[in-house]
Every structure is written in C-alpha cells, then in structure tokens.
Image: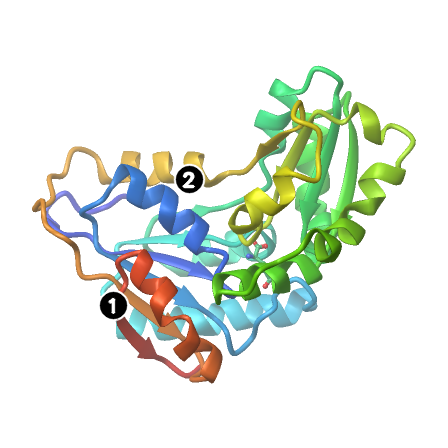
C-alpha cells in the first residue's frame, strides 16, 4: 500500500510498548525534523517481551484499531522488535497504511563482523521467535550468535528515561552470559534488538571492549520512512507532535519533561 501523493502533511505513528520507540523517534527526527509524529506507548500492556504470542497479536490488533479510528494516520512504524517479529503479517493484512517494522539488525551485523561471533541482545520473546531464528539462518548462516534475552534491561531503560541513573552493577549481570560464553571474547558486533536498548547505549558501551560495535535498526528505519514520504516538502517550523498512552499513570506524568526533549508537548490518554 502506498501513501497518497495528494496528502501534503502525512502523520507518522511510531508505536512501542513503552519508551523504547523514542530511540526510533530520535532517528526519524534526525532526517525529518519538520514531520509531525504521533508517539504511542501501549503502557497499559507493557512489557511486551514477557507476553504470550496469541495475547500479544490480539492486543496489538485492538490497539491499532482504536488508534486508526481515533487519529488520521498515514504511516505506521512498529518501533518494537518484540511486536514486529510476531505481528507484522497480521498488521499488514488488516490495516491499509504502509507499515514499517523494526526487526533485529542481524544482516548488517553479519556483514560487519570479522570474527562472525555476534551478540544478540533483545527481549526474552524476541530471542525465542522463529522470525529471529530465520533472520539468523538467512543472513548469518556462518556466525555464532550469542543470544541474551532480558526484560530487566527494558525496565532499566524506562527508569533512565525518567531521570534515574543506571549503574554498571545493574547492567553487568544481565550481560554476563556474553562474557561466560566460550567464544564471548571473539564477539565484535552486538545487535541491540530492542528499541529500548539504544537509550542505554552509553551504559552498554562501557561494558564491552572498543572493537565491539553496537548495532541497531534505528537509522535504517528512518531511511525507510524518508523513502515512503518521497519528495514531499514540509513547512520549516516546529511540528505539533503528540504522545498517546493507553493508561494514565504517575509514570506518564513523570515522563513529560523527557517527551519535551523530543519536541513532544501534547499528551493524550486513549484507553484500550
Ligand atoms: N521496545 C520493545 C522492543 O523493541 C520491547 C519492550 C517490552 O518488552 O515491552 O522489543
């Protein structure tokens, strides 16, 4: 499905369970500073990485129906690896908008890795998905992929974005399986396959030797959005972004200063 060339001001919806999709918002804003965004966090159902497959598909379906009934949306970015690796076929067959999914950056990691020992850091659900295993089989057939699934790291990213300082002692035990692996010291590429994790890039960076590259899908997603928009011109003024949460809570209120750093000053609660 393509975007109508007559729509002068397409609205891009960026969707995640929590604040992780803001790492994708950042990448989109680098390339498209004047495009209005609707940032959606399904915080009522957060976290996604511990949920069963059937319940997650029906949840995402319900949330997207409510969102597309409520807002005029022209492009949907599923800024969540956990949701994308499971629900993309369903969403693509049920919604007419172009859908951009975020999936683990196995392909670029395999292309860049000299040792062909690659780390995969994601939610427990993403590391277990057949979709992820297929990506590895297809794009990194000769690599040793060391997979670590952590929901705790997702929680730490949420805390960091709300202003908490995250220490090495909180991060290190989560990463220990990489260091304990027999080929762990050969690893030279680490895929950040959860959109929350680039928010902890500095904290993760210092845990690994300098030759380990941290690779995520954010920039590629922004490029895909740019190509969907074609050569549309946008008024060069601060766009009116909107953040939507599926449940009111003190944690949402606490997030407002951080949302403002992304130029997001309007907030809606849409209960699903
Ligand atoms: N940010 C999401 C991802 O990219 C998942 C976080 C969660 O478990 O809800 O996988």
Which residue is painted at 63% across and 32% down in the image? 106
Label 1 element class: loop
Outermost residue toward the right in this view: 182
Viewer can see residue 231:
yes
At label 1, counting other C-alpha atoms closer than 10 Å, the crowd grade (few under 14, some 14-19, many 20 or more) is some
Q: Is residue 93 above or below residue 133?
A: below
Q: Is residue 164 above or below residue 37?
A: below
Which residue is painted at 56% across and 71% down in the image? 58
Residue 39: x %, y % from top left: 35, 62
Tell me the quarter of the image containing the C terminus: bottom left
Out of 18 and 106, give the one closest to the viewer: 18
Viewer can see residue 1:
no
Query: Is residue 230 toward the left or the right of residue 181 in the image?
Result: left
Q: Which callout, 1 or 2, points to the residue nearer the camera?
A: 1
Q: CA distance from mark 1 to mark 2?
A: 24 Å
Label 2 element class: helix
Out of 59 and 233, give the one closest to the viewer: 233
Which residue is painted at 57% across and 60% down in the image? 165
Q: Which mark is residue 221?
A: 2
Name the residue tied to disc 1: 265
Figure quadrant of residue 258: bottom left
Which residue is painted at 62% across and 58% down in the image? 166
Q: Is residue 22 above or below residue 242?
A: above
Outermost residue toward the top in this view: 114
Figure quadrant of residue 32: top left
Residue 10: x %, y % from top left: 19, 52
Beta carbon at label 2 within 8 Å of ligand 1: no
Outermost residue toward the left in this view: 235
| Of callouts 1 and 2, the N-terminal one | 2
């Amino acid at each position: 499905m393509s975007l109508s060339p007559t729509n002068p001001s397409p609205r891009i919806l960026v969707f995640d369970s929590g604040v992780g999709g803001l790492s994708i918002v950042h990448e989109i804003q680098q390339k498209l500073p004047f495009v209005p965004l609707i940032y959606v966090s399904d915080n009522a159902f957060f976290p996604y990485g511990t949920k069963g497959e059937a319940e997650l598909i029906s949840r995402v379906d319900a949330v997207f129906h409510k969102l597309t009934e409520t807002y005029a949306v022209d492009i949907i970015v599923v800024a969540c690896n956990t949701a994308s690796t499971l629900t993309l076929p369903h969403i693509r067959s049920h919604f007419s908008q172009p859908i951009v999914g975020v999936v683990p950056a196995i392909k670029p990691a395999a292309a860049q890795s000299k040792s062909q020992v690659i780390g995969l850091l994601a939610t427990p659900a993403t590391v277990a998905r057949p979709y992820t295993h297929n990506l590895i089989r297809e794009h990194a057939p000769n690599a040793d992929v060391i997979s670590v699934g952590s929901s705790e790291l997702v929680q730490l990213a949420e805390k960091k974005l709300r202003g908490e300082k995250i220490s090495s002692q909180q991060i290190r035990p989560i990463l220990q399986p990489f260091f304990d692996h027999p080929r762990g010291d050969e690893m030279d590429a680490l895929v950040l396959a959860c959109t929350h994790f680039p928010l902890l890039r500095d904290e993760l960076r210092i845990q690994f030797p300098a030759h380990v590259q941290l690779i995520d899908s954010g920039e590629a997603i922004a490029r895909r959005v740019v190509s969907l928009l074609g050569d549309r011109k946008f008024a060069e003024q601060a766009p009116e972004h909107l953040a939507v949460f599926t449940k009111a809570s003190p944690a949402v209120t606490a997030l407002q200063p951080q949302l403002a750093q992304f130029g997001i000053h309007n907030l809606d609660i849409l209960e699903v």
